[in-house]
Image: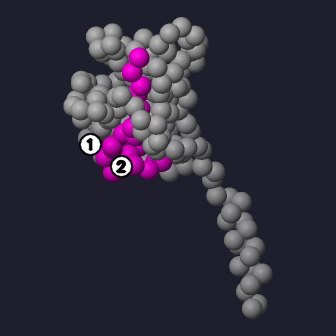
Amino acid sequence: MRHYPLYLITLFLWGCSAPSINDYTLLPTQTVYQDKAPLSSKSLSVALSKSVASLSGKNIIYLHENGETGAYLYSRWSDTPSLMLQRSLLTSLYAQGVFSSLAPSTSVAKSDWILESDLDAFTHRILNDKSDGYIDITYRLIDTQSKRQIASKRFVVSYPSSSTNATGGVNALKSSEHELNRQCIEWLKTIAKEIK
């Protein structure tokens, strides 16, 4: 019982000296919302990406040239990469006015098409003294009635980082994510024009 006050003081001091954790998130590209008729009369739902185990949490992953991977100790994402990418793409698609309606695949609303994906990389890639935000994802567009694959495409996007720390990696991944959305939407627009 004599050591109880000492224990409380030690715990308090340790808590005060522990470094804080920085949370980061991905925000969609700022775009002007379209008021015109949608490009396609189809409805689309966007599924969460299936990802490798290291990307299923909120860790910000780095990858060295020798193949060594790890997670930044005091920085993390606000959500999983799959969830952030899904939300960002839905917002960007809505702004572009490509489909008649959009929803996440968890919605009870039925859709004509579903966009599935496999996320293989979402990392801060460090190569010697330079680095980049690196995303490797494959999208599949599926007809929900016939269960037939309409099209698929792999996107590999990278954007240079201003530094080799977590903040530089996050900013580079944000830029890569904006470019990924742009490329994916252009691909979906092409398909929507071909299949009315």
For residue 43: magenta?
Answer: yes
Residue 183 in view here? no
Q: Is residue 77 left or right of residue 128?
A: right
User: In this orientation, does residue 196 appear?
Assistant: yes
Q: Residue 51 location in percent, x, y? A: 33, 44
The numbered disc on residue 144 is: none
- Which element is circle 1 on? loop
Residue hosting label 2: 54
Give the residue displayed 42% in from the left and 25% down from the top.
Answer: 43
Question: Which class describes the residues within 10 Å of circle 1: few (<14), some (14-19), or many (20+)?
Answer: few
Q: Position of residue 151 (x, y in %)?
A: 24, 24
Which range of residues does the magenta coloring cover? 41-63
Location of residue 32 in the rendering, given as x and y in whole percent from the top left corner: 59, 12
58 or 11, nearer to the observer:
58
Of the residues under marks 1 and 2, which one precedes in the sequence?
2
As drawn, the residue found furthest toward the left would be 148
Say which of 158 and 67 sits in front: 158
Q: Is residue 149 magenta?
A: no
Residue situated in front as seen by the camera: 192 or 164: 192
- Residue lying furthest bottom: 1
Q: State how far apart marks 1 and 2 are (Cα).
A: 14 Å
Residue pictured at 24% horizontal, 25% vertical: 150
In front of the other: 25 or 12: 25
SS class, disc 2: helix
Give the total number of marks visible in the rendering. Answer: 2
* Quarter of the C terminus within the rendering: top left
Q: Which residue is mark 1?
A: 67
- Residue 73 rendering spot, x and y as whole percentages: 50, 51
Q: Amino acid at mark 2?
A: Ser
Residue visible at 35% across and 18% down? Answer: 188
Q: Quadrant of residue 75?
A: top right
Describe residue 35's horizontal placement relative to residue 127 as left or right: right
